Image (cartoon, rainbow, N blue to C red):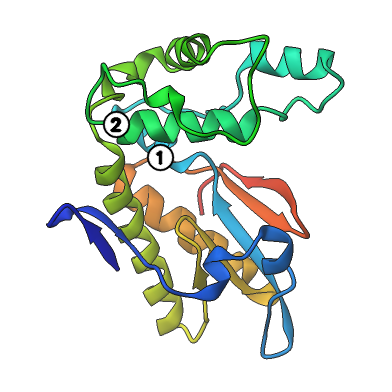
Amino acid sequence: RIFNDGTFEHGGRMYGAWYQRAPSWLRSRIVIDDDPTVELDFSGMSVRMLYHLEHIDYLEDPYSIAELESRAIRNGNGKDHFRESVKTIVQAMLNNEDADKKSEMVWVSQSFNPHFTRAEVKALILSKHERISHQFGKGIGKILQRLESDMAFRIVVELMDDGILALPVHDSFLVEDRHKDRLLNRMKAVYNDRLSFWPIIKESRKGKNKRTTTEGV
């Protein structure tokens, strides 16, 4: 586990395995003892945790911005065209320790030009997440990473105790297909035990994501 800033309160993610740096299409081809695998992912985990820490349930996609989706469709792209770029900016805003710093100027995979400035995108994000907007620009991202990493570590160890190998990719996990339900139930139980809300979990297979569940064990 790698911690940050000389304190065990920040970070704590597990790093080092080659598959963590592999693209999703390649991870989907990983086998364990010649058995195919499935990858389950906590959807929008950092933002969702912030809502749950504020005792607010949140079921939406935190990176879905209606104005950007409409523009993407009008441009002939899929509605999720700007999603990864929005996610990048949101993470920069969470990790930024200076509210006045232009965290929205981080590099993104899809440019918003010429239809939106970065300042406009940041304003749209803050508007969408008005109920937790006071948390942005305070460096809370590394604290959320510690919470996320503690849950990930617990999931991996508890499955290991059951004889199941789970390969962690920060907030997602790969297991053999036959252990999918065991992983799903463990992810839900660990998250609920820590935050008293149910997570949203996606299944990533062959480069495609499918929402799996929002319900309890």
> Which quadrant, please, contains the N terminus?
bottom left
Label 2 and label 1: CA atoms lie apart by 14 Å
Query: What residue would you read off at disc 1?
Result: 46
Name which residue lies at 46% across and 11% down: 119
**Looking at numbered disc 2 in the image, what kind of residue is underneath it?**
Asn
Answer whether residue 188 is visible to the viewer in this image.
yes
- Sequence order check, earlier mark of 2 and 1: 1
Answer whether residue 61 is visible to the viewer in this image.
no
Point out the residue furthest to the right here: 76
Query: Residue 120 appears at what percent x and percent y?
Result: 51, 9
Residue 97 located left or right of residue 195: left
Q: Is residue 199 above or below residue 3?
A: above
Q: Nearer the viewer, residue 2 or 54?
A: 2
Residue 181 located left or right of residue 159: right
**Looking at numbered disc 1 in the image, what kind of residue is underneath it?**
Ser
Comparing labels 2 and 1, the label whose residue is closer to the camera: 2
Q: Nearer the viewer, residue 6 or 212?
A: 6
Q: Rate crowding at label 1 as few (under 14), some (14 to 19) or many (20 or more) other CA atoms within 10 Å.
A: many
SS class, disc 1: helix
SS class, disc 2: loop
Q: Which mark is residue 96?
A: 2
Name which residue lies at 71% across and 18% down: 69
Q: Is residue 126 above or below residue 185?
A: above
